[in-house]
Image (cartoon, rainbow, N blue to C red):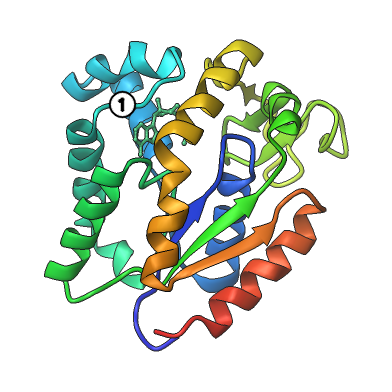
Amino acid sequence: MSKAAVLILLGPPGAGKGTQARMLEEDFGLVQLSTGDLLRAAVAAGTEAGQRAKAVMEAGQLVSDDIVLAILQDRMAEPDTAKGIILDGFPRTAGQAEALDGLLATAGQEVTAAISLDVVDEAMVARVSGRYTCAKCGEGYHDEFKKPAQAGTCDKCGGADFKRRADDNAETVRERLNAYHAQTAPLIAYYGEKGVLKSVDAMGPIADIRAALSQIVKTASV
Ligand code: AMP
């Protein structure tokens, strides 16, 4: 890669966008930008944007483009993003995709690759409902599929506090899947037409998906 990469991870809730984004950070020194994380931080901090977003997020629907774009733009203005970014959970609508193109164009950049993590919808409810993270370092775990080696202790940092997201319950996940298919899945065609779309089978082991993504990033033409 010769200039800062702009990677997009596309896929429904539970596809593994967050997990793989963290691995791409480790493997390539890129910076993960998760609009979900930024919005949850705004909700926790009680900012005006956070107050407007809270109920929408709890219902599993999409927060309005103006709120999301403002939050993302602020984050993209921070200097660490010059290393290259992985967008996790953004863009989610055609309007966001077009706004991103505009934002990148003013900085002389463009999308390097939009990677679709292909999964079977029915498996996503179980994946999302059982997941939780270390409150200290953010490492992700799952009740069935990825338990810590020692129960109650984070493998990565030794932390003993874990948290679950309010919207990671079966009912809200179904709503989030509907929102994904109605508003976000059309972006697969959008990036296909731009010639930057890559697809990865994301139903297999996390390490295999990591290897497939690494390959894509190494060969991405920038
Ligand atoms: P995530 O952490 O990506 O699963 O996002 C959690 C929730 O935050 C979503 O269900 C939406 O309510 C909201 N959200 C996150 N990113 C976006 C976005 N790009 N556009 C609209 N809403 C978003």
Q: Residue at x 53, y 62 (%)?
A: 25
Q: Where residue 146 sits in the image (x, y, percent)? A: 81, 38
Residue 88's place in the image compared with 49, above or below, is: below
Q: Position of residue 78 (x, y in %)?
A: 23, 57
Q: Splitting the image into 4 quarters, where does residue 95 fall? A: top left
Where residue 67 appears, as percent x and y from the top left, is: 20, 31
Q: Nearer the viewer, residue 94 or 152?
A: 94
Residue pointed to by mark 1: 63
Give the quadrant of residue 217: bottom right
Q: Is residue 84 visible?
A: no
Q: Position of residue 83 (x, y in %)?
A: 36, 71
Residue at image location 73% in from the left, 35% down from the top: 141
- Quadrant location, ligand no. 1: top left
Task: Classify mark 1 as within 8 Å of ligand 1 or not, answering yes or no.
Answer: yes
Against 198, is 90 above or below? above
In the figure, is residue 123 to the left or right of 67? right
